[in-house]
Image: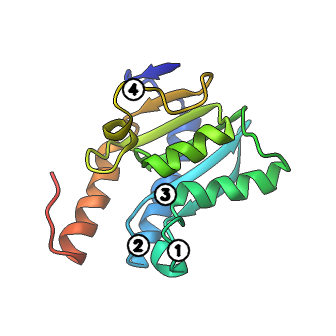
Amino acid sequence: MAVSRSGTFSELDRRCMKEALRQARAALVLEEVPVGAVIVAGDRIIARSGNQVEQLKDSTAHAEILALTSAFHALGSRFLEGATIYMTLEPCLMCAGALASSRIGRIVYGAPDPKNGYLRLTADRWPFHPRTVLEHGLYGAESLSLMKEFFETRRGDRIT
């Protein structure tokens, strides 16, 4: 298990997270919770998605789940050991479980989710595959800004 909070990200990391943010903005336009995900194998994007829960009327249609499904098809494999997923928000417990099952090599997310994120629900247990590397904080402020915009304008709620 490896967790990095250093903020030392590559140019590829930055490009991929910017694409995840584009996916999140597209979800926002559709009045979905603005979460985006991008999966990269090598230096090539093989899957991308934004949340589609409302569009598909499917509570499991999170950006991460949809991107994982696309990546499995793209690679013809049920494991993603050499791949990286970029997500704008800390994964929920459902998505953390799917990521663990995928054996994804690396997870990079932007903003924490103190209300529904896996960290709140797993306490001190590592929910991912033992070889998965976890990094966070890349474009976290931008990711959080999208979430605040969604909740303030669509539901009148305020999140801190």
Q: Which residue is mark 2?
A: 32
Residue drawn at 54 percent across, 36 percent down: 107
| C-alpha distance separating marks 2 and 1 | 12 Å
| Residue closest to the eye, 60 or 112 | 60
Q: Which residue is mark 1?
A: 58
Above or below residue 59? Residue 72 is: above
| Residue closest to the eye, 63 or 86 | 63
| Residue closest to the eye, 15 or 146 | 146
Query: Could you tell me which secondary element the residue under label 4 belongs to?
Result: loop
- Left or right side of 27 for 84: right
Instruction: Give the image location of residue 74, x and y in percent.
Output: 80, 54
N-term mark: 4 or 3: 4
N-term mark: 1 or 4: 4
Q: Amino acid at mark 2?
A: Glu
| C-alpha distance separating marks 3 and 2 | 11 Å
Q: Quadrant of residue 103?
A: top right
Sort mark 1 into few (<14), some (14-19) or many (20+) by Cα contacts within 10 Å. Answer: few
Please state which of the two labelled residues, at mark 4 or mark 3, is closer to the viewer. Answer: 3
N-term mark: 2 or 4: 4
Q: Amino acid at mark 1?
A: Asp
Query: Could you tell me which secondary element the residue under label 2 belongs to?
Result: loop
Find out whether the residues at labels 4 and 3 contact each other: C-beta distance under 8 Å. Answer: no
**Please, which colouring scheme is shown?**
rainbow
Q: Quadrant of residue 3?
A: top left
Q: Which residue is mark 3?
A: 36
N-term mark: 2 or 1: 2
Residue drawn at 43 percent across, 79 percent down: 30
Q: Amino acid at mark 4?
A: Gly
Marker disc for residue 7: 4
- Left or right side of 109 for 43: right
Please state which of the two labelled residues, at mark 2 or mark 4, is closer to the viewer. Answer: 2
